[in-house]
Amino acid sequence: RKEVEQDPGPFNVPEGATVAFNCTYSNSASQSFFWYRQDCRKEPKLLMSVYSSGNEDGRFTAQLNRASQYISLLIRDSKLSDSATYLCVVTVKAAGNKLTFGGGTRVLVKP
Amino acid sequence: DTEVTQTPKHLVMGMTNKKSLKCEQHMGHRAMYWYKQKAKKPPELMFVYSYEKLSINESVPSRFSPECPNSSLLNLHLHALQPEDSALYLCASSPPSAPYEQYFGPGTRLTVT
């Protein structure tokens, strides 16, 4: 079983619609959680951290469910520029500064 | 200055060549990283330098040799690579206060012929 799993998609989303997707992690000692975004042929960029209480950044909302070991990302009012691969990232304190990436979820927003 | 720069952008090398990839940041970050990324896959960690000392080597073959000359620079020396080493090589850095918030450079796209 992979440490961090994501639905690869693609999620085809009409412009203006809402899309949500999850990421599951297997290590119960996982400590910190993040969503990174990677555009085609570009580098990954930090989108947002995920806190236990859930957090929102504009149109993006991230949630953490420790009991079921998953995190989620919801994008409201999707824009064409939201088309990207969204990488779920999990860390374990014992692993130092190592990020463990999920395989990514591809989102395509269409007019 | 909030960016990580990498040179070259593209590199084609033969299996007998020796080349180096360079990475630079001037954000005062004290941790720097090398990742390898194949198409449609997530980045795979190769090396971590923390305060200019190698802290993590993810069992990378010795044909890849990292070097951290100072806190702003990170090199990856390449020698006798194989065609399967062709990939995007990403450098990243992170601040001491937030080691998991990593800033990635644009990468070097390496082709081994």
Image (spheres, coloured by chain):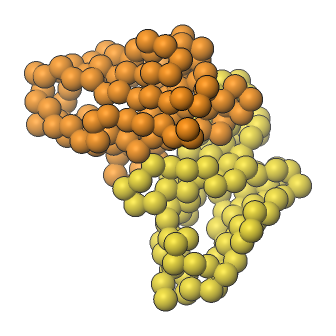
Chain colours: A yellow, B orange
Q: Is residue B34 something one can see in this rendering?
A: no
Q: Is residue A20 visible?
A: yes
Q: Write the residue at 32% across / 34% down.
A: B7
Quadrant of res B73: top left
Residue lying furthest right: A53
Q: Position of residue A85 (x, y in %)?
A: 50, 61
Horizontal and vertical percent for residue B29?
Answer: 61, 26
Q: Residue at x 68, y 49 (%)?
A: A34
Identified at 64% across, 55% down, the residue is A47
Q: Determine which quarter of the picture holds residue B83.
A: top left
Number of disc labels:
0
Q: Is residue A31 left or right of residue B109?
A: right
Whether B91 is drawn above or below A9: the answer is above
Task: Tell me the quarter of the picture where residue B97 sits.
Answer: top right
Q: Residue furthest front?
A: B1
Quick check: B37 above or below B34? below
Residue B108 at what x, y percent from top left? 32, 39
> In the figure, is residue A72 to the left or right of B39?
right
Q: A66 or B2, which is in the foreground?
A: B2
- Quadrant in which the N terminus of chain B appears: top right
Specify whether B63 is left or right of A8: left
